[in-house]
Amino acid sequence: MSPGISIGMLRRGHAACGRNPLRGIAIAGSLAYLWFGCAQAETAYRPIEPGATELVTLTGHDLTVDQLVEVARNGAPVEITAEAKRHQEDAHGLLLEAAAEGMAVPWFNRSDDTAQTIVFEGDPGEPATAANLQARAFAAFQSAANAASSPEINSEEIVRAAMVVRANTLTYSPVSAPVTEMLLNFLNDRITPAASGDPANPLANIAAAMVGRGDVYYRGVRMPADRALAQAGLTPISPTDADEPSFVGTDAFDIGRAALIVADGRQALDWADLIFAMDLNGRNGGIAPLSLPAQSNRPYKWIYWDAARILDMISGSYLFDEDGGATRIFPADLTLSATRQGATWQAWGALRDVVLIALNSSDQSLAIRVALSPRDAPELTTPQMMRFFVKGGKYSGGKRGYIVPALNRDLYPLTNEITAFAASLDAFGQALTQRTGAAPAARSASDTNPMPTDRARQTLDASFGLLALDLVNATQLLDQRNTEDTSRTFGSAPTAVWAAFRMAAPAQTLPDTALSIAQQFLRVTKPAEFYPKGESPPGSDDPIPLAQERLRR
């Protein structure tokens, strides 16, 4: 007997080949097996294919996942609002004023949050102090070119996603304006630093490129950073005072990768629903388990929503009609899909919500709150908290505020939700193996990645591989049902997918070619083209919680 497709095989193929693991596929009867190969070496750089032209405006508080994808993956131009720039300038001014007033500020006039090592005392604008701070900042940016201790990231979209995240969240940071402007120039001119995303200093290579050090990819071509800047008509920046810790102190790489997983997870789940609708038609399936009586007896919001969505997709299908006096039975190989797709949607929704907060708030180790006064919360008037109060003066334009050590660099709850989404994708994969006939494999050490974003990415890409097989099978079943009775209808959405895929892969297409086409089809074709009227997932219209708004207790 031919071996079945395994989720483990799909994961290992992705690990070796990047986002598109499938090279060759063979199908024997209802069984299928894959073998993996790589068109390129594992370290081959994967540039983006820019095509987006609509400007994305960053405010610091309403960046969406779709907007991030447009910039990171599709090369959309980006700008930052005047208000976001002013907010950043105010944060920078308050930092300078705090030092001038004699406050011990970690990572500025003190070495760290223990405040044990004095970097400088007094006015940061005093000429000798300012010159020393600028020299320290430049040396820190420059030395970052050799700071990487992790493998280089070979995907342009991942580095660009990190830069989008950082550009949006710098409004909460006290970096100087030239750092933000250079980051926007990198995105708009497609200067993508050769970066490692090293957890110890995640944006080190990006910082180095800003001063013309290290290597970058300029529009997909690798070259020294100083040459790329010259070709783009840019001048290396001169970082100052707190630029280095304020810029690189972030988890932007993890947040950006999580946002890309949210985008691709939505694509996979949208396709899963559409192909499920095709499967129901192809298997002459009963619809009763998806109906209101069954769903309302176990009212899990997301499962109920997904069942209603699939019923809407097959609206007008022959499945609602009489079947020669017989009762249609829900297909046994779709039983897991009926609940696990909705449950995976729920895990996706929870991840989406925390990603949106992470995209639009600060993970800095210092919380800088301009215009906050002791009257704004009871604890702010206490002697301990008044140590963090900045009265205001020449550097802050008279504005007061607080500069407080924060613990916002901890990636939880984002790590919790991305781990939960990966686990849910595992269960979803079991449903897909049930309905495709693919054989699951026992988990091996090589299938288990300790990094949650890597684990989620591998499992998600494995799901796309199984969905491709499911699409091929479902299309063949619809061919058969149509041949049996040409008057049968399948619902507008399943019919549209069936027709579109048959245009891409006609019925006579060889099985291995059809599966390769399906893999590409699911990646590049938007499900909304076939089901535009679909209700958005629960919570899609909820406002993103605003960072730095007054909390209600």
Image: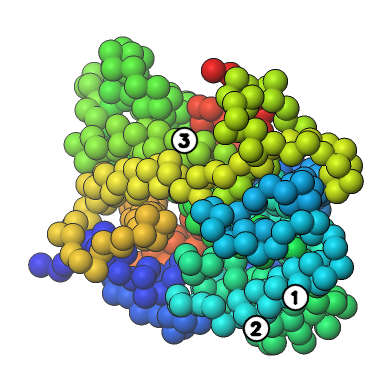
Q: Quadrant of residue 138?
A: bottom right
**Does residue 534 lie above or below 209 as drawn?**
above
Q: Secondary structure at mark 2?
A: loop
The residue sitting at 47% across, 65% down in the picture is 199
Q: Which is more N-terminal, label 2 or label 1?
A: 1
Residue 83 in the image: state x and y as whole percent. Answer: 84, 41
The residue sitting at 53% across, 27% down in the picture is 539
Kind of residue indicated by mark 3: Gly
**Does residue 268 lie above or below 509 as drawn?**
above
The residue sitting at 73% across, 27% down in the picture is 373
Which is more toward the observer, 299 or 507? 299
Label 1 vs label 3, nearer the camera: 1
Label 1 vs label 2, nearer the camera: 1
Residue 46 in the image: state x and y as whole percent. Answer: 56, 75
Q: Which residue is mark 2?
A: 214
Q: Is residue 172 left or right of residue 355?
A: right
Q: Is residue 320 left or right of residue 336?
A: right
Residue 223 in the image: state x and y as whole percent. Answer: 68, 87
Residue 464 in the image: state x and y as whole percent. Answer: 40, 56
Which is more toward the observer, 471 or 47? 47
Q: Which residue is mark 1?
A: 135
Q: Quadrant of residue 397?
A: top right
Q: Which residue is mark 3?
A: 349
